[in-house]
Amino acid sequence: MKKFISILIVLLTIIACSTTSQNIASTDTTPIKKGNDTVRIANDSLEYEVIIIDNGFTNWLASRAYPRNYYSLQYLENKNYLYVTEWNNRVLQPQRYNPNLYEISINYRPDIHYGYEVNYLIYNYMIYFQNTYKQKLWGYVPSR
């Protein structure tokens, strides 16, 4: 059975914004398919899939995120583990945290090497999410 890491974050806003597409290439994943603020990464050899759907994320990624290779892979993995752990804790507490923001848990395992591109996109989504929705998952959140 395939193991999947799935991030499906659907945050609907009243105003739909359209953004320009940007092709993101990576050496360790298959091509990313984008459309209407959807980022998808799949790697059949590792059997994982990441899908990020959020109005404004692709535009934010293209205009405000630090470039690839700015952070080390170890830095991204460590931050993602902390962010995802807190995210999953909030998914389990819908009475305390907005269930419209924390809809689905993220299956991110630190013992699996997902590669740079996946960790880069997860990390940047977490920064985008925290700044856009005024949330603080863990520690200092860069304001870009």
Image (spheres, rainbow, N blue to C red):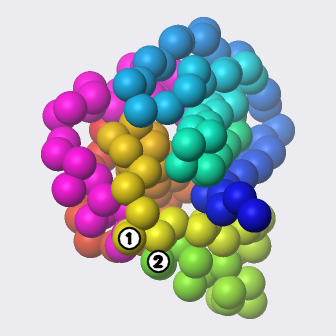
Picture layout, residue 72 above or below residue 91: above
Is residue 48 something one can see in this rendering?
yes
Prevailing secondary structure class for the magenta stretch in the rendered image? helix
| Quarter location, residue 63 | top left
Mark 1 to mark 2: distance in Å? 14 Å
- The C terminus is located in which quarter? top left
Instruction: Please give left or right for residue 63 compared with residue 77 in the image.
Output: right
Q: Which residues are magenta?
A: 56-83
SS type, badge 2:
helix
Q: Which mark is residue 85?
A: 2
- The N terminus is located in which quarter? bottom right
| Quarter location, residue 97 | bottom right
Q: Which mark is residue 111?
A: 1
Residue at point 78%, 31% (across, down): 15
- Badge 1: few (under 14), some or many (20 or more) residues near its Cα, within 10 Å? few
| Image position, residue 29 (x, y; %) | 49, 32
Residue at point 75%, 73% (across, down): 99
| Image position, residue 125 (x, y; %) | 48, 46
Residue at point 63%, 15% (across, down): 19
